[in-house]
Image: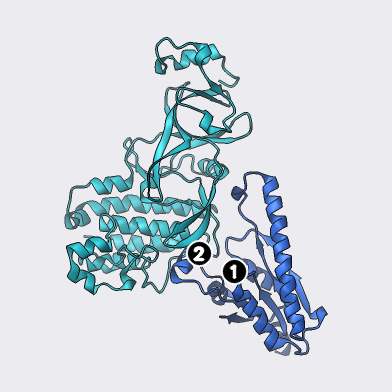
Chain colours: A cyan, B blue
Amino acid sequence: MESMPSRVQIHQLAARWLAEGSRPQDLRIHTDTSDFFALDAGDIMVLEGRPYLIRNSIREGRFGLEDEIKHWVKRSVDLETGAMRIIKLVFYERFTATIGGIEFECFRSPRKEARILDLVNDHPHFMHGRSAADEKGNIVRVLEYISGSSLAAHVADLEQSHEPYFYSTLPGILENYLRCIEAIRFLHDHGEKHGDIRRDHILIDSDSGQYRWIDFDYNYRHRENIYGYDLFGLGNVLIYLVGKGDVLLPDLRLRDPALVSRLTDGDMNIVFHNRLANLKKVYAYIPDSLNRILLHFSRGANWFYEETPQLLQDLHEARADIR
Amino acid sequence: MANRLELHFNRNVLLAVDDSENARRAVAYAGYMLGGVPGASVTLLHVISEPDEDYFGRTEEKQAWLEQYQRRVDAFLEQYRRMLLDAGFPAEAVKTRTPRRTCPSIAECILAELDRTRYGTLVVGRQGLTRKEEFLFGSVSSRIVGHARHCAVWVVA
């Protein structure tokens, strides 16, 4: 459909999702998405002639906030195909994020996400979608819905103690995670950052089994190292995977106070000082080659990764030692 | 041999600055060491690293941001110029440069400026970053020390 469909046509397409007895004249149809608060469940959005039925706004936890409603992100139905879509409306947000006491400037960019969607349009390890302009030129992103859980939830739900997890489950997870890091390298090679690398921004696609990055509309004002924050995120996810969760100092104090007395400041995460990076001190069977990688993200590190190829090289070598 | 020495050894100094206390110290130090030295000249350099297009909602915002930033830069460069004149540099021996660049790495942009000209010495202030800041953001002075070629580098801590 390239021209604007009529109200009656839209109503016919949406009928199976609408309340019984609804009428074409009851539909609220939006072609200007500038005020995303005005777009409610049951409304219709028409983008470049294509109608979408809004179901609801997405919820997500961010920076410690549980289930924050993202009013600019709408779960929607493509009325031409019936497919579920995630539609991200324009929201220019600039804020100062504080990570481990460090402030840096972050901003949301629809333009960036649209650009990356074009770049990764058939890459198996990213979410897919396209951008579409509304009548005011707002860059709206229409994303394919990925069914599946986040990597974080997947690992958290595994009912295994650490040692069997390490030997039987982690190798497969690391293989997939390596592909995720290579995907980030792909972005960096094209001059792009992900901008918000977190363990809940990798979804395990239940249809394909592929690990896929989502949510790359964040950006940050880098200083000397353009990819530093992305690398930090990759390291945090890796430590989480190897540890089968965050290994936190307060938990260790309860579990094993004697162990805590053997830890030093240098063993802790370089930014999050309550998280252990030197996991070999808890799980002695972690090979040195893998633990050395984790230590590059610790307070005791004398050298930091500057580029993803460096991390990839070390991780490729280390995975052979997990046997 | 003498010509190659002349190429690399001269009293032309590139002083890379921003509006930080570290930069001010670097200017003061350069003034102290070289003020009044015959043949010494300083170019005060501030590379304006243009933010990503993504940072701005509209093009007009970027233009306004750049204009405001340029005014700030001009102000602190003028302060630093006066510090050097007070230290004994003649007016014609102190210049300023504010190129606008897209800079994945500020250090690389500074070194690119060095490559274009015949500076014998590059002077920078050291930021005094914490380890975690250095990890997340990188260090301009560390990168300059690691990558500078064919010049002397002074890092003023």
Disc count in the image? 2
Residue at mark 1: B107
Q: Are marks 1 and 2 on the same chain?
A: yes
Q: Quick check: can you spot residue B112? A: yes
Q: Amino acid at mark 1?
A: Ala
Furthest residue in direction right, as rendered: B92
Mark 1 nearby-residue class (10 Å; few <14, some 14–19, many ≥20): many
Q: Tag 2 or tag 1, which sits nearer the N-term? A: 1
Given residues B102 and A274, the one toward you in this image is A274
Instruction: Determine which quarter of the picture holds residue B140.
Output: bottom right
Instruction: Determine which quarter of the picture holds residue A68.
Output: top left
Which residue is rendered at x = 67% and y = 50% of the image?
B62
The image position of residue A109, as x and y in percent, is 55, 45
The image position of residue B13, as x and y in percent, is 70, 80
Given residues A66 and B113, the one toward you in this image is A66
Q: Secondary structure at mark 2?
A: helix
Q: Secondary structure at mark 1?
A: helix
Q: Is residue A262 above or below residue B98?
A: below
Residue at mark 2: B137
Q: Amino acid at mark 2?
A: Phe
The image position of residue A180, as x and y in percent, is 39, 50
